[in-house]
Image (cartoon, rainbow, N blue to C red):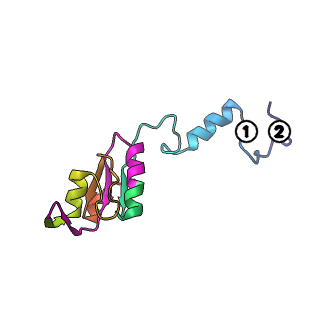
Amino acid sequence: KNIVANPSSPPSHPTTTKQSQSKDSAIMSPSQNHSTTTRKDKICIIGSGNWGSAIAKIIGMNCQHQQINMWVYEEYVSYNNQENCKLTDIINTRHENIKYLPGIPLPHNIHAIADLETACHDAT
């Protein structure tokens, strides 16, 4: 039941009638109206330290069917007895940030990119 004290003034809170629900849905943006949304947001994580890598792991697991870009400050590290290996190459091939989150596998949909503009391109 809806009880309206003054029918000429708008309610101070959303009502539960079908009419108000459809009205509320109509004014929501597509990204807010989850029942009709088919668009996938493009995600970019800026940073690849231990926090950035940890959140990349969580987001990558929750968004398994889309690529997640992670901006990585290009560093050169030792890997497999080789000096001067690009950290981005290691993250993209080994799926692990051996410098900042060693021993923790990253999902295969995480893509390390050294150029910030490229990593963020079209991110929503």
Quadrant placement of the N terminus: top right
The residue under label 2 is which amino acid type?
A: Val
The residue under label 1 is which amino acid type?
A: Thr
Residue visible at 81% across and 40% down in the picture? 7
Give the mark nearer the N terminus: 1 vs 2: 2
Q: Which residues are magenta?
A: 56-81
SS type, badge 1: loop
User: In terms of depth relative to the viewer, which is nearer, 8 or 71?
Assistant: 71
Residue visible at 48% across and 42% down in the picture? 30
Pointer 1: what residue? 15
Q: Tag 2: Cα neighbours inside 10 Å, few (<14), some, or many (≥20)?
A: few
Residue visible at 29% across and 54% down in the picture? 96
Magenta-drawn stretch contains 58: yes
Q: Position of residue 100 (x, y in %)?
A: 34, 64
Pointer 2: what residue? 4
> Where is 120 relative to 26, above or below?
below
